[in-house]
Image (tube, rainbow, N blue to C red):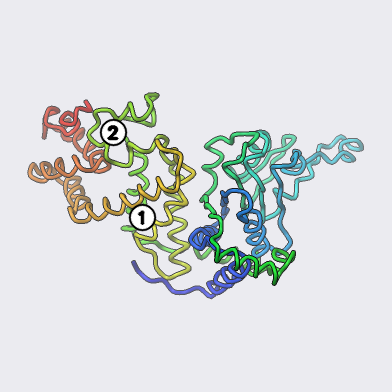
């Protein structure tokens, strides 16, 4: 894809990467995804990993690298009160003048926000944080505080016996979720060397690399970065592959795999995805594509597939949920093959031709392709409805009838 002029702010991001790599061992792929995600407005990242893998350390290193000491972390493991997260009443104002003045919490005011052990937050606190992430505002005592740009990082140990199960819409508000692996033997030695060098000052020694104004400028430049229409089409198609179901899974109470019985498309991604991703996945993947192009000068289809792992992993539930990283990895590998087949068949060109003008010969070709591609089939269904009304084809000829969907 096309190159882009390098920004004068790019070295700051590379410096942040260097300072992190001096203090955090391993998980390079996850760290790269996290760094990219920091480059767009209202960035939210969930760090998932077992105990002792450095989740909290990584969260603090990032916050220090962006905000120095000017950030706020709340802990789900402690009893977080409303006043700490949202705000509390200023009692003297109420007593003297009868005025309900709200003292807004540092957590909502700070541009750098951290939540340790998000899986232990009580439902009330979760609801407040969710509202902040969804609408960019918080309410207390009938008053509203609007939150402008911010960076929020949270940690979670999914294998913990948690007090509360957080609802899927809450996780959907996180742009990406990265998984950290435990260290190999050689990495353990490297970590011991780090501890010898820094001791207890590992986090404290982390400098503020990117100032607030620089971060705002970077995010403005990323927002204004253009991504080629073909790549936007690729993103839309990729996410649709994980959403589509010709049998209406979104509005059906029939569970998988029962819903898939007898379906023509059982070998596709749809048969392994119980809950499809929301449309936010498309928006976030586009933001990451812009960030990648801004930082490295180009972004390609393979980059999109790699980044999709972190965007999709927490937004879907799988038929086989035991190994989510393995499952998403296999499905994305299958997607690469599928995208190559689509390119080889020139199927989007054929569809565009049919949108412009009905042709019996092209329609026959399109039906053959659609039998191998449910997203393409979905588009053809719409065209068929139009052609039936116009009398160009009969309902009996349609692909829907041929596949037994109608």
Q: Is residue 261 visible?
A: yes
Give the residue number, with chain letter if any, for mark 1.
Answer: 232
- In this rendering, the answer to whether 44 lies above or below 402 is below
User: Horizontal and vertical percent for residue 392?
Assistant: 11, 35
User: Horizontal and vertical percent for residue 173?
Assistant: 54, 44
Mark 2 and mark 1: span between their CA atoms?
23 Å
The answer to which image quadrant residue 376 occupies is: top left
Residue 246's label in the rendered image is 2
Q: Does residue 142 appear to the left or right of 252 in the view shown? A: right
Q: From the viewer's perspective, is the residue at label 2 or at label 1 nearer? A: 2
Tally of numbered tags: 2
Image quarter of the C terminus: top left
User: Horizontal and vertical percent for residue 45?
Assistant: 56, 52
Q: Label 2 crowding class (10 Å Cα cut-off): few <14, some 14-19, many 20+?
A: some
User: Horizontal and vertical percent for residue 362?
Assistant: 11, 46
Q: Nearer the viewer, residue 372 or 239?
A: 372
- In this rendering, the answer to whether 320 lies above or below 329 is above
**First reached walking from the N terminus: tag 2 or tag 1:** 1
Q: Label 1 crowding class (10 Å Cα cut-off): few <14, some 14-19, many 20+?
A: some
User: Residue at (32%, 42%) from the top-left corner?
Assistant: 269
Image quarter of the N terminus: bottom left
Q: Helix or strand or loop: what does disc 2 sit on?
A: loop
User: Residue at (90%, 40%) from the top-left corner?
Assistant: 92
The answer to which image quadrant residue 293 occupies is: bottom left
């Amino acid at each position: 894809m096309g190159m882009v002029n390098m920004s004068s702010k790019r070295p700051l991001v590379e410096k942040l990467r260097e300072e992190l790599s001096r203090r955090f061992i391993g998980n390079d792929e996850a760290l790269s995804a996290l760094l990219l995600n920091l480059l767009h407005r209202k960035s939210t990242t969930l760090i998932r990993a077992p105990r002792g893998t450095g989740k909290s350390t990584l969260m603090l290193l990032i916050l220090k690298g962006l905000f120095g000491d000017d950030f706020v972390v709340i802990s789900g493991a402690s009893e977080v009160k409303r006043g700490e997260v949202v705000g509390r009443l200023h009692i003297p104002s109420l007593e003297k003048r009868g005025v309900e003045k709200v003292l807004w919490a540092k957590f909502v005011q700070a541009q750098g926000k951290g939540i340790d052990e998000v899986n232990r937050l009580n439902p009330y606190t979760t609801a407040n944080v969710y509202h902040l992430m969804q609408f960019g505002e918080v309410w207390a005592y009938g008053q509203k505080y609007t939150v402008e740009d911010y960076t929020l990082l949270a940690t979670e140990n999914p294998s913990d016996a948690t007090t509360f199960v957080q609802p899927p819409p809450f996780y959907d508000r996180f742009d990406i979720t990265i998984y950290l692996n435990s260290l190999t033997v050689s990495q353990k030695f490297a970590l011991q060397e780090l501890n010898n060098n820094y001791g207890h000052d590992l986090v404290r020694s982390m400098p503020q690399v990117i100032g607030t104004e620089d971060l705002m400028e970077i995010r403005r430049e990323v927002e204004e970065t253009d991504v080629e229409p073909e790549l936007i089409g690729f993103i839309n198609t990729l996410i649709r592959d994980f959403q589509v179901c010709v049998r209406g899974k979104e509005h059906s109470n029939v569970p998988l795999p029962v819903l898939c019985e007898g379906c023509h498309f059982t070998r596709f991604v749809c048969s392994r995805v119980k809950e499809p991703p929301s449309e936010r996945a498309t928006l976030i993947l586009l933001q990451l594509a812009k960030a990648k192009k801004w930082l490295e000068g180009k972004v390609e289809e393979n980059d999109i597939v790699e980044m999709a792992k972190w965007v999709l992993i927490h937004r879907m539930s799988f038929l086989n949920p035991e190994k989510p990283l393995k499952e998403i990895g296999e499905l994305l590998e299958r997607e690469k093959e599928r995208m190559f087949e689509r390119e080889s068949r020139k199927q989007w060109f054929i569809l565009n031709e049919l949108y412009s003008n009905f042709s019996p010969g092209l329609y026959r070709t399109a039906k053959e392709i659609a039998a191998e591609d449910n997203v393409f089939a979905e588009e053809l269904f719409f065209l068929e409805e139009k052609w039936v009304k116009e009398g160009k084809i009969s309902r009996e000829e349609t692909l829907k009838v041929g596949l037994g969907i109608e």
